[in-house]
Image: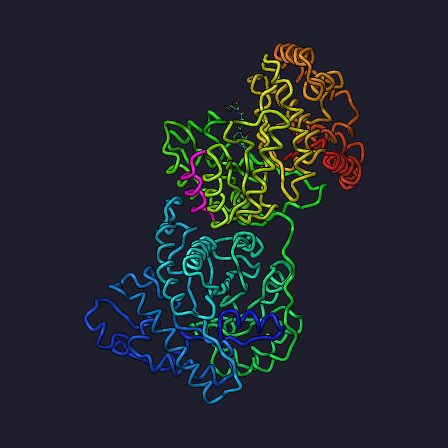
């Protein structure tokens, strides 16, 4: 059987049976320390009992016997005993060529068992896959509670270990590689990265199977990700199947399988434990019990491959054989929506009426003096508080930028992201890695288990560099911001913006094979009303380019750094925020669906008094020098009366009926008079529930309406 044979069998709609546990079966042979050591490891210090992979060298007869028993029980797929056969798990015993020997022997033994079985049962077809475990280290978590930035191993070391193991497995022509017991998606991503490199190098089409273990009934990995977030993280890989193993037995696995079957465009595998471990660490579920639970997997059409993990025996596998004639899962088509993830999935819909994704801009050493100071003085906890506040204020993605001449940006990116990755309230949302230094981008990608956005690549240094960066992104799995920049510099007119974006799009989609929905164009938000006449066109040209991109570069998204627009009004926050709100209102209507913004901005489009709105809209959309000048003088007026304006609006608000005041408080997230207003409403309505049904509900509807009309671009906290 070749690798493609598994694909063929699954493609023909047949269910396949995978073998059962190796570890718990080995225990039943009651091997001693001497069995594990053999002659070969006689003098190695420490205990070797329990290092099951070593047995392929010291007791190959036992391993082969286990394979034979699973084959006789009806397994179609035999798993070579290579779960820990990489140098990280073998660190204590490491010696020259050990990894090579272990993997080679394990595959040889499994093959021998299969060949012997087939020679006696010529009507059977069986194949040999290799299991690749998660190692005994984790890339997403710190083993030191007092230092969340610490990691016991680096991405590069894990990647190298996987390369070494996979190289042997590819040389042995296994029928598939099964990355198994995935508890940390970043370990898995390092494995997938290595798999793709080895596959390219060998030019062999050996399929990749992934199997996750979840650690709670809600279906999260130990590293905190949901299954859907996991799927986003591995979406870039050429995957044959995803599934679940180990975990907590079949009964509670079904809800997780439903999530995979509904969302994952692959075949589905399931090999649970024989129930939950008992107090002695044993597994009690009988073959009949396991069968009665796994029967539902097949009846619901959720799976393509079934087998067993810890505690299962040939009897369990034999029982599962009776399900083989059942209904196999039909994979769903790949989604056309964009998938991003932190610990949770974020979907950005492909339709034109998609919602708007606001990216928090404040964790940027070039965009926030405070953040720069905190990073410079090493106050990472406080720097993290800036990230947390943005998420609380409604940021749906976090931009992180460490580019500063006086900082070691690579080191700071790693330190900050390692900390951020350990905070479940912050790392709920995806991260946008913002740097003009490619090594900093790569470092960022090596820290995060989620599906990130890389910000950014461009044709600035020519096609070769652009393509090389794009290939890195494809290999490591991320979405990408593409700046409208080429060999001639920044595209600052409508014509140049669309030309550069179109050229970039075709290179990415046709040459590199990046999915269109993973591309975000940034046609450059540049500062208007600077005094230089050409600059007056910048907002309008951005909006026109947005419309063109949305109509012509199918599937791609549009983003921009919104605060750039108002740099010439620094210090005048009201006018800046008003300009941003107006700009976003119009750009969103033309399809801008991402924006790097300050999530705590308070001014909404619908707040801006009519005459001021007119001036701002004229300056942005009808760009004459006269209109720019009017905006500049409006800004000067406002700078003089800012304090006045706020106070006046408060007193004005106080004169309004209590219902209106509550609606306003809810819409703007303003709690200044909330206590008193609520007391007044309670006195007027008598029952609290009436206040909820009345003005509070009206307030919610108002929020919904503004949001729907694009007049409120943030879920105001
Ligand atoms: N496109 C893409 N990425 C980007 C930008 C872009 N990344 C950086 C930048 N532009 C977007 N981020 C910011 C962040 C902050 C500000 C502007 C853009 C900003 N800061 C205030 C200032 O400088 O006046 C705050 C100062 C302070 O608090 O110290 O305006 O265009 N792809």
- Please identify the quarter of the rendering in which residue 606 is found: top right
Q: Nearer the viewer, residue 192 or 429?
A: 192
Image: 444 above or below 596: below
- Please identify the quarter of the rendering in which residue 34 is found: bottom left
* Residue 447 lies in the magenta stretch: yes
Task: State how the image is colored.
Answer: rainbow
In this view, the residue farthest toward the bottom is 120
Q: Is residue 259 left or right of residue 206?
A: right
Residue 120 position, x and y percent, is 46, 89
* Residue 336 lies in the magenta stretch: no
Residue 220 position, x and y percent, is 53, 57
Q: Which residue is pictured at 42% across the width and 80% down the height?
A: 67
Image: 609 above or below 22: above
- Give the magenta-colored segment's residue range: 436-448
In this view, the residue farthest toward the left is 43
Q: Evaluate whether residue 144 shows in this view.
A: yes
Q: Nearer the viewer, residue 234 or 570?
A: 234
Residue 509 position, x and y percent, is 58, 46
Q: Nearer the viewer, residue 48 or 158?
A: 158
Label the magenta part by its dominant secondary structure. Answer: helix
Q: Is residue 197 left or right of residue 329?
A: left
Q: Is residue 76 left or right of residue 499?
A: left
């Amino acid at each position: 059987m070749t690798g493609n044979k598994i694909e063929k069998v699954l493609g023909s709609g047949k269910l396949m049976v995978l073998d059962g546990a190796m570890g718990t079966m080995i225990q039943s042979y009651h091997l001693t320390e001497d069995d594990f050591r053999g002659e070969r490891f006689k003098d190695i210090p420490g205990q070797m009992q329990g290092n099951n992979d070593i047995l392929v060298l010291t007791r190959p007869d036992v391993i082969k016997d286990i394979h034979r028993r699973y084959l006789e029980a009806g397994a179609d797929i035999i798993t070579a005993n290579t779960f820990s056969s990489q140098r990280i798990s073998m660190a204590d015993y490491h010696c020259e060529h050990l990894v090579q020997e272990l993997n080679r022997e394990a595959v040889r033994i499994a093959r021998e068992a299969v060949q012997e079985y087939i020679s006696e049962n010529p009507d059977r077809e069986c194949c040999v896959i290799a299991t690749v475990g998660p190692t005994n280290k984790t890339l997403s978590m710190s083993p030191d509670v007092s230092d969340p930035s610490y990691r016991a191993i680096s991405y590069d070391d894990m990647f190298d270990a996987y390369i070494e193991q996979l190289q042997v497995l590819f040389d042995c022509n296994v029928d598939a590689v099964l990355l198994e017991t995935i508890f940390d998606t970043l370990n898995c991503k390092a494995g997938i990265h290595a798999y793709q490199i080895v596959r390219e190098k060998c030019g062999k089409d050996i399929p990749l199977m992934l199997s996750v273990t979840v650690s709670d009934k809600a279906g999260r990995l130990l590293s905190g990700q949901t299954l859907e977030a996991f799927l986003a993280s591995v979406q870039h890989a050429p995957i044959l199947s995803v599934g679940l193993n180990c975990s907590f037995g079949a009964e509670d696995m079904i809800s997780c399988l439903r999530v995979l079957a509904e969302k994952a465009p692959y075949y589905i595998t399931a090999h649970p434990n024989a129930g939950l471990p008992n107090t002695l660490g044993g597994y009690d579920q009988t073959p009949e019990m396991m069968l009665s639970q796994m029967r539902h997997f097949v009846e619901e059409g959720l799976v393509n491959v079934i087998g067993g993990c810890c505690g299962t025996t040939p009897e369990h596998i034999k029982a599962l054989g009776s399900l083989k004639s059942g209904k196999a899962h039909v994979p769903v088509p790949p989604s056309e929506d964009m998938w991003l993830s932190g610990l949770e999935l974020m979907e950005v819909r492909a339709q034109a009426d998609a919602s708007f994704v606001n990216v928090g801009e404040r964790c940027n050493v070039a965009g926030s003096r405070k953040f720069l100071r905190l990073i410079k003085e090493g106050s990472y906890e406080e720097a993290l508080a800036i990230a947390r506040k943005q998420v609380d204020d409604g940021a749906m993605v976090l931009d992180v930028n460490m580019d500063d001449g006086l900082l070691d940006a690579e080191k700071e990116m790693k330190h900050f992201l390692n900390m951020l990755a350990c905070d479940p309230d912050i790392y709920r949302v995806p991260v946008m890695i913002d740097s003009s230094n490619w090594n900093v981008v790569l470092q960022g990608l090596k820290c995060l288990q989620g599906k990130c956005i890389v910000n950014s690549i461009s044709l600035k240094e020519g096609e070769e560099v652009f393509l090389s960066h794009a290939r890195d992104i494809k290999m490591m799995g991320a979405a990408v911001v593409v700046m409208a920049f080429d060999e001639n510099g920044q595209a600052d007119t409508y014509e140049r913006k669309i030309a550069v974006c179109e050229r970039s799009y075709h290179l990415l989609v046709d040459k590199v094979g990046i999915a269109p929905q993973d591309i975000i164009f940034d046609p450059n938000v540049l500062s208007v009303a600077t005094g230089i006449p050409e600059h007056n066109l910048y907002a309008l040209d951005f909006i026109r380019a947005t419309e063109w991109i949305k109509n012509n570069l199918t599937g791609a998204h549009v983003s921009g750094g919104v605060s750039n627009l108002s740099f010439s009004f620094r210090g005048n926050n009201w006018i800046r925020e008003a300009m941003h709100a107006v700009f976003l209102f119009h750009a969103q209507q033309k399809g801008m669906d991402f924006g790097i913004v300050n999530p705590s901005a308070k001014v909404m489009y619908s707040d801006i008094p009519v005459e001021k709105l007119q001036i701002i809209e004229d300056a942005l959309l009808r760009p004459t020098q006269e209109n720019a000048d009017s905006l500049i003088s409006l800004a000067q007026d406002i700078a003089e009366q800012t304090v006045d304006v706020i106070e006046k609006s408060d007193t004005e608000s106080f004169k309004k009926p209590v219902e209106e005041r509550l609606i306003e408080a809810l819409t703007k997230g303003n709690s200044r008079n909330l206590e008193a207003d609520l007391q007044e409403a309670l006195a007027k309505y008598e029952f609290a529930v009436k206040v909820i049904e009345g003005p509070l509900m009206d307030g919610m509807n108002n929020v919904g309406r503004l949001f729907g009309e694009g007049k409120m671009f943030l879920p105001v906290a």
